[in-house]
Amino acid sequence: MELNPIFPFEPIATNSVPAGPEWISQIKWDGVRILTYFDGTEVKLFNRKLNDRTNIFPELTNLKSYTAAQSIILDGEVIALDQNGNPSFHEVMRRDGIRRLDRIDSAIEAVPIFYMIFDILFYNGEWVTDLPLQERQGLLSDVIEPNKHIQVVPSNTDGVALFDVAKQHGLEGIVCKKLTSKYLINGKNDAWQKVKNYKDIIAVIGGVTYRSGVVNSVLVGLYNEKNEFIYIGHVGTGKLTNSDWKDLTTVIESIKIEKNPFSNQPKRIKEIQWIQPLLTVKVQFIEWTEGHSLRQPSIQAFVDKNPKECTFSD
């Protein structure tokens, strides 16, 4: 039996917490979506884009340490914590971004990760995606034995209260789910809804500025429906370290260009070095201002995403 990776069910964004006895809510962890596949012989890990992450998170591959299932597919989020014990996208990307396997052992020690499991799609040779969420949750609790690295995400019937907790602790937000919902592979509908405490996007870098020969800020943009690359903001704050900025300075040497790649002209920014729009970064911000620009943007981490998929409608 071979279990091929699938595109996971995605929630839609909403600004209000749905109410009613048919809804449960879960914390939205600021991590990396990872599905675990076990066909009875081999364990594989894939992200939402179907990229193999088995060697990146080897702590999760000892399946017998947390389930006795003969075969299984699990859906969850891999997270890492910052110095204050809060989920940090920047920290988890230090692991997810590793491409040299000789660095894995040191990364395991430097950046411990945790797998927050919230759904089960396949169990002992049978697809369970057509079961209502309430039954899948019961099955998940029965077959998973939590340990140091593995946790089952708890559910709460009071979404408003849980969202208040998320805000108090600076968490990403919550996901609200109908107890009757099936798991829709490669789908998205309002049976799952995400309510964010803050806004974030994956944007494309089209230019940089320097200080003392090192990049100290980036100019970012998104593509519109006409495939035009639109400048949306200038970002120089966030979670990048001095080493990250130095690495970026080196990386862009081979992709510098002379012409502005944006369809519009950034204002009030001097001495810009334009680059090919190839690098993508997660940017957190408060809100959109008039003219499609970001208010109080901050960089969270570099990410691996096709720049052409970074759109206003994403």
Image (tube, helix red, strand yellow):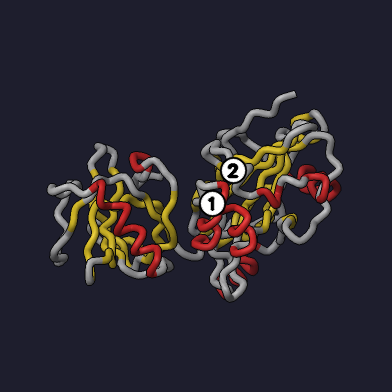
Q: Amino acid at mark 2?
A: Arg
**Residue 134, can we see it?**
no
Mark 1 vs 2: CB contact within 8 A:
yes
Answer with the quarter of the image where residue 165 lies. Answer: bottom right
- Using the numbered discs, state the Cα–Cα distance from disc 1 to disc 2 in whole angstroms: 8 Å
Q: Residue at (35%, 64%) from the top-left corner?
A: 245
Q: Residue at 60% across / 55% down in the picture?
A: 175
* 259 up-or-down from 44: above or below: below
Q: SS class of the residue under badge 2? A: loop
**Which quarter shows the N terminus?**
top right
In the rendered image, residue 240, in percent from the top left (x then y), is placed at 41, 66
What numbered label is drawn on residue 114? none
Q: Quadrant of residue 224?
A: top left
| Horizontal side of residue 33 vs 241, given as left or right | right
Q: Position of residue 267 (x, y in %)?
A: 14, 62
- Tag 2 residue: 53
- Outermost residue, front side: 102
Q: Amino acid at mark 1?
A: Asp
Q: Where 222 falls versus 81 (above or below)?
A: above
Q: Is residue 292 left or right of residue 126?
A: left
**Whether residue 129 can be seen here:** yes
299 w.r.t. 133: above or below: below
Asked if residue 178 lies left or right of residue 145, the reply is: left
Q: Nearer the viewer, residue 250 or 60?
A: 250
In this view, the residue in front, 303 or 100, is: 100
Callout 2: few (<14), some (14-19), or many (20+) C-alpha neighbours within 10 Å? some
SS category of the residue bearing label 1: helix
Percent position of residue 39, x then y = 75, 31
For label 1, count other residues whose C-alpha is less than 10 Å away and answer few (under 14), some (14-19) or many (20+): some
Q: Which residue is mark 1?
A: 96
Q: Residue at x 27, y 46 (%)?
A: 277
